[in-house]
Amino acid sequence: MGNLNVGFIKIMLVSIAVILNGCATFGDRNSDIKLELANMEQVESLASVGEKLYVNGQLTMAREYFRDILDLDADNVSALYRLGNISFRREKLDSAIGYFRRVITLNPRHAKSHYNIAVIELMKAERHFQLYVATASASQDLSKITDILSDINAFATNEQSRKELKLDQMWQALEHR
């Protein structure tokens, strides 16, 4: 009978330990949910302030707020997109493309990021075409290149002719010249 009581006591102790562990796990899940909700509220708060700073042109401070969001949520598409715009406005084109590519990795249908990458690549192409014109020999026919530069300039300056010129048509023109 003594061995039976010892066995029973061991089973009871193990059962109590399992029950207590289950309660602790449930408590951990509650803590995790509370922590995630707190992070979401903090992200929303940071985004609100960051957006106001961005709209008011305070890019350096806005950048810090959007970076803080990434510390809490590394895949926050809105923060990544804003950081891309800030990089672009600060003329850090490679950095901007990096942010926009991260946005597209997370959301391949993010149209504005595709558009922004296309614009940046056009700006880079324009620089190379300008260098080509500046360094080409005098006998070189530059009319096609100057047409391309004119199209890029029209697109960049948002002239009326830009509305008639679609992005894919520009790329076709670049490929065929």
Image: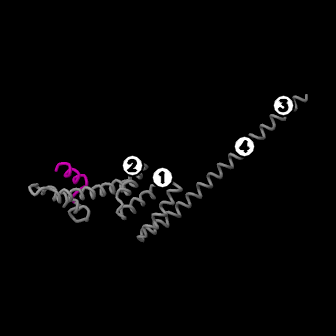
The image shows residue 152 at horizontal and vertical percentages of 22, 59
The residue that mark 4 highlights is: 21
Q: In this view, does 16 lie to the left or right of 124?
A: right
Which SS class for mark 2? loop
CA gap between label 3 and label 1 equals 53 Å
First in sequence: mark 3 or mark 1?
3
In the drawing, what numbered circle is on residue 75? 1
Mark 1 Cα shell of 10 Å, populated few (<14), some (14-19), many (≥20): some
Mark 2 Cα shell of 10 Å, populated few (<14), some (14-19), many (≥20): few
The image shows residue 35 at horizontal and vertical percentages of 61, 55
Mark 4 Cα shell of 10 Å, populated few (<14), some (14-19), many (≥20): few
Q: Is residue 164 left or right of residue 109?
A: left
Residue at image x 46%, y 67%?
A: 61
The residue that mark 3 highlights is: 7
The residue that mark 2 highlights is: 108
Amino acid carrying label 3: it is Gly
The main secondary structure of the magenta stretch is: helix
Amino acid carrying label 2: it is Pro
Which residue ends up furthest to the bottom in the rendered image?
56
First in sequence: mark 4 or mark 1?
4
Which residue ends up furthest to the right in the rendered image?
1
Of residue 133 and residue 10, the one placed in the foreground of this image is 133
Residue at image x 33%, y 55%?
A: 117
Q: Is residue 125 left or right of residue 40?
A: left
Height in image: 44 above or below 29? below
Which SS class for mark 1? loop
Mark 3 Cα shell of 10 Å, populated few (<14), some (14-19), many (≥20): few
